[in-house]
Amino acid sequence: MNKSLKLFTIFGITIKVHITFILLPALVGFMLLAEGPLVVLRGIIFTFIIFGFVTCHELSHSLVAKRFNVEVKDITLLPIGGVASMQGIPEEPKEEFLIAIAGPLFNLVMAVLLFYPVYLIIGEGLRGMSFMNVVEEGFSSWKSTLLYIFWINPILAIFNLLPAFPMDGGRALRAYLAHRLGISKATRIAVALGHAFALLFGFIGLMSRWIILIVIAFFVYIAASQEERQIDLKMALKDYKVKDILNEEFISLSPDTPLSEALEMSLRASQYNYPVVKDENLLGLLSIQDLLSTIHRFGKDRKVNEVMSKKVITAKLDESLALVYNKMIKNNTKVVVILEDNNLKGLITLEDIARIYSIESYKT
Ligand code: ZN
């Protein structure tokens, strides 16, 4: 998800678009090309308005999340919808519930607000508001385009309220069930429903040759499975502490070691990240990738302290592995340095987490 362009920042949240999203107006324009330039124009305007509503939907989630002290870094718009990247999930199921329904709630409110003005402009009574008119007329007139725009919000609300992962409704259902059944069982139910809806979408898509629906079906199926893996992982990790799995044998580097020497060392060590230490103080972390790319670009004469990353995420021996994993996700890093009273104890990497996960899943 790195291929994104920044658009603007609002309420401290950066709005980004994935590059594939930019293809969408072009694709819509291309598909409508045969119907004339005015239809193409309406189609493209319509696409941008969807984009606006999806952004507001994600912002609604994000603002409620912020209220519960869940940090939201950015919102990325993909062709299939928006993703708000929240730093961790709220501890309280009630908070997760409110964050989840905030998005669809925005669309419901918009639908109600827009109904009467659109009803007046179209001026053909209730029958003129029917979704069937959209299906029949598409973007053939400005009125039918307006009706299409009106229908975006009810459709977004209904789709997102389906009680299945990865839809908002699934998240709300999980939060609701978590009270009674515990988070693990609640997640499994929402995931099973997600798979069921995905199969249903896929079936309807195949029957009606509606390709978009087949794409959505794939996306829903995969996202539901991911959600299940996340919760499995958390369950597997929750009983472990850092000290249970920490390998205390590791190599550290001094800040003025030349890169040539660091490279030589790394040939023999089965280590991908090296703490940089001076007088027992942790100064930074050098990854093999940074080492190699610096050597590739600037040669071997530089020193470790010129290349190392100074932003190091740390944890303590008594911290649970689930928490360490959360820190990795939150900070987008694959390695956490373990410090106890400022003494370097070792490293926990994503590979360690994966190892524990496979051991735990083998047990059950
Ligand atoms: Zn949502």
Image (cartoon, rainbow, N blue to C red):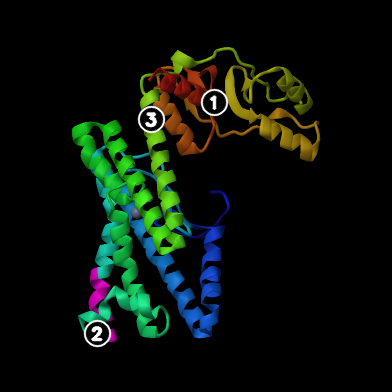
Left or right: residue 274 compared with residue 101 = right
> Please, what secondary structure does the residue beneath circle 1 have?
helix
Give the spatial CA distance, label 3 vs label 1.
16 Å
Q: Residue furthest front?
A: 207
* Extent of the magenta region: 112-124
Sequence-first disc among 1 and 2: 2
Q: Badge 3: how crowded within 10 Å, few (<14), some, or many (20+)?
A: some
Marking on residue 351? 1
Amino acid residing under circle 3: Asp
Answer with the quarter of the image where residue 265 lies: top right
Q: Which residue is drawn at 26% across and 59% down?
A: 105
- Residue 95 seen anywhere in this rendered image of the structure: no
List the residue tagged with mark 2: 120
Residue bearing mark 3:
232
Residue kind at label 2, given as amino acid type:
Leu
Dot 1 and dot 2 residues touching (CB under 8 Å)? no
Q: Position of residue 116 (x, y in %)?
A: 23, 78
Mark 2 or mark 3, whichever is nearer to me: 3
The residue sitting at 22% across, 38% down in the picture is: 177
Instruction: Give residue 144's position: percent from left, percent from top.
Output: 36, 81
Q: Which of 67 and 213 is in front in this view?
A: 213
Residue 243, image quadrant:
top left
216 up-or-down from 42: above or below? above
* Mark 1 crowd level (few <14, some 14–19, many ≥20, 10 Å Cα): few
Q: Which residue is drawn at 49% across and 74% down?
A: 44
Which of these two is toward me, 208 or 275? 208
Q: Looking at the figure, which quarter contains the C terminus?
A: top left
In depth, the one of 271 and 149 nearer the eye is 149
